Amino acid sequence: MSLDPIARIRRFNRAVTRETGVLDQSFLGRGRPLGTARVLHSIGPEGRDLDSIRAYLNLDKTLLSRTLRGLQDEGLVTLAPHPEDARRRIATLTTAGLAEYHAYNTLSDQQAHALLARHPKPETLLAAMDLVASALTAQAITLEECDPQSRDAVYCLEEYYAELGRRFDTGFDVNLSADPEAADMMAPRGSFLVATSDGLPLGCVGLKGTDKGYAEIKRLWVSPASRGLGLARRLMDAAEDKARSLGITTLRLDTNAALPEAIRLYETTGWHQIDRFNDDPYPTHFFEKHL
């Protein structure tokens, strides 16, 4: 007999409520409830548009206004018209507000370290947290074009290479692969897209420009915690849209038999298999798609 899934979810919710201090009137001992602390933190050192805060925290407009008034009364926040649109307002932290922001960060970091320290398998715990966070925020995952040498891009690529090393019988050495030049995955030749959620990178894909009459899709990767949410298809669709905007009409890609989920994705989204078109030692399957 399996345990009741609803009971398990409710147990999880209660545990998170206790651990995060949702019901505390003095979150982390700073004299304010969690909701108020989250609003202060979301403003950040650079300040933030009120509409952006509401969207980020999914807050009712009236509740946000009431919370901001409280922070103003404490001398932690100031409000001013947006410099480009007087109908909008910008919230900015005062010197005292910045001090509270940093105090919350320090205490929150300490709380997180303590949680990891008391668990026998911290990496397993983090993986479970990543899985839950991705499931709860799937609709909030955004795709951003970035430099393939940026921090988030490099993180995704390193995770991608490490996974290939685990899954390929021969291992994977990027120095033996036909690794694309960064400039080939930047406008006007190509593009590099990274999927992020709340600032954390969850996946990537590269569009590599060539001088051969076609462009290539390279380095499609999705975090294990975000798989099954349609993110790989979103990344591929975005890469194809970017190719169209650059006037590219033919795309090619290669993959390995050890990645059957990738092969299924290509076979069900309009790609067709072709003969080998490069001398990369790792791929076993080759695909093409006309846009």
Image (tube, rainbow, N blue to C red):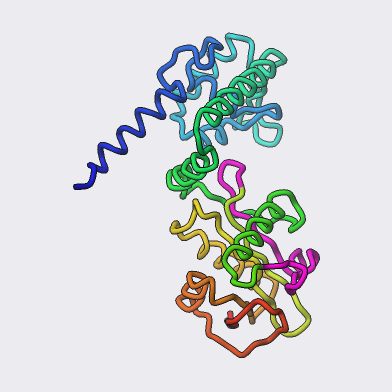
x and y percent of residue 269 in the render?
48, 75
Which residue is at a point 80% across and 65% down the rendered structure image?
Answer: 183
Q: Is 109 left, or right, of 281 in this rendering?
A: left
Q: How many marks?
A: 0
Magenta run includes residue 32: no
In this view, which residue lies farthest toward the bottom?
A: 275
Above or below: residue 114 compared with residue 147: above
Identified at 71% across, 84% down, the residue is: 278
- Does the magenta portion include 199? yes
Left or right: residue 86 versus residue 233 is right
Determine the image quadrant of residue 62: top left
Foreground of the two, 98 or 90: 98
**Could you say where residue 23 lies in the image, as x and y percent from the top left?**
40, 18
Please identify the quarter of the rendering in which residue 283 is found.
Answer: bottom right
Which residue in the rendered view is the most extreme toward the left?
Answer: 1
Quarter of the image that includes the C terminus = bottom right
User: Measured from the top left, where is residue 242 in percent x and y?
Assistant: 64, 67
- Determine whether, in the image, residue 202 is placed left or right of residue 64: right
- Start and end of the magenta stretch? 172-200
Of residue 36 and residue 80, the one placed in the foreground of this image is 36
User: Residue 166, percent across and down?
Assistant: 59, 63
Residue at 71% over, 30% down: 46
Q: Quadrant of residue 86?
A: top right
